[in-house]
Image (cartoon, grey):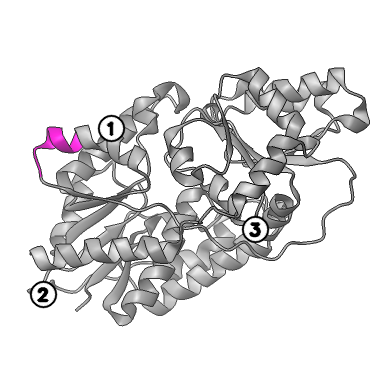
Amino acid sequence: MSRVILDISRLISRVRHSTPSGVDRVEMAYARGLQRRYGDDLTFAAVHPTGRYGRIKTATALAYLDELERRWTQENKGHGQRSILQVLPWMLRLLPHKQPKPGPKHPVYVQVSPHHLTDHRKVRRILAGENARFLCMVHDLIPIEYPEFARPSGAAQHRRRMETVVACADAVIVNSAATGRSLKPWITQSGRQIATHIALLGTEALPPAMDAAPDARPYFVCIGTIEPRKNHLLLLNLWRNFAETLPPESVPRLVIIGRRGWENEQVLDMLDRCPALKGHVEELAGCPDRQLASLLRGATSLLMPSFTEGFGMPVAEALSVGVPVICSNIPAHHEVGGNAPDYVDPLDGLGWKTLIADHAAKGPRWRAQVARLTQWQAPTWDGHMRIVATAIHDLQEKY
């Protein structure tokens, strides 16, 4: 009888994609981490794209995880999204089989993505069929707290997810204390006793760098989906100013890594149509891990001007390889970065301009941060999984 059941619906839903989102990486880390910790006591399950729920054979699930990691690491942007015909063999192999009748002991059902959480009744049916206790991860409440940064339907969808969480979860993992503070009123209002465990996301070891294209100019990277809350518009306006006021050879490069999101008309217009940015700003939508690692390791600094974040994974990734960071002065970034990065208000354009110019010249602010980086400690997945294992143990002991 399985002690732990891990829902991998999100990863299966991404069968056509070659590059991962942040949530994809978290679900993969859980699949690998729980497999190492629990071995045969771990079972994989999923809601298949057909809507069918059930168990996934361990050998099939592990083979699929290997396939995804190969794509993420090795493939380039030319692969794009696969057709339904191309992924049909995997879709068939990953069809879930019916879960066995539940035993007398309650397994712990772990879900770390928001996949199907909008369907309250489906989640209740799954938990009842498994006779399981529910451990769920909440990444953020941004669509509810900042609906202007979400898709038009995003706030309502996320409210349904949080309603499902507080109605069904027996314990919750949050990726930062900031997320925990946002979730607390929901738990209080539910009237239920739901244990909340704070576990910063682990920092993955980046793959070896590829050979970088020669260019004498320093460059900065900005990593994340191009969406309003990431504040790309600030950077693009600064780069237009650099291009208009500096000699071309003195303008640093900006590499924006991330797919295009939603509600982005002005940002996309600048990327597509602003002549001043040509030759200075590069956009990479599909970036395999090896290429991303090369770009990050070679960068002067990472720029992260977000208005809000649940965690801020790129900050940790940059600091972990000794790359300085300029990021917005928000709670989630402070939790990840400690005293290492240079923090600046996301609305302070002059402050960003001054810091970017200093870092491009490897000036005193850049050198001071490089000295601080030696004291920064990366959060690890091993540490994260120890907290998850404690949460699982507590649920098993409680019931």
The residue beneath circle 3 is 289
Circle 3 or circle 2, nearest the eye: 3
- The x, y position of residue 311, in whole percent, is 44, 43
Image x and y of residue 177, in percent: 33, 42
Residue at 56% x, 44% y is 340
Pointer 3: residues within 10 angstroms few (<14), some, or many (20+)? many
- Report the side of 361 relative to 197 (left or right): right
Assign a secondary structure to mark 2: loop
Q: Is residue 237 magenta?
A: no
For the record, the magenta segment spans 186-192
| Residue at 42% from the left image edge and 72% from the top image edge | 61
Q: Secondary structure at mark 3?
A: helix
Apparent side of residue 81 relative to residue 335 in the rendered image (left or right): right
- The kind of residue tagged 2 is Gly
State the residue in front, 118 or 159: 159
Q: Quadrant of the N terminus?
A: bottom left
Disc number at residue 103? 2
Circle 1 residue: 159
Pick whichever of labels 2 and 1 is earlier in the sequence. 2
Mark 3 or mark 2, earlier in chain: 2
Q: Residues within 10 Å of mark 1 (few under 14, many from 20)?
A: some
Q: Is residue 256 visible?
A: no
Disc on res. 144: none
From the viewer's side, name the closer residue of 372 and 102: 372
Image point (53%, 71%), residue name: 66
**Residue visible at 30% across and 61% down in the picture:** 387
Q: Is residue 31 visible?
A: yes
Cα separation, mark 1 vs mark 3, equals 33 Å
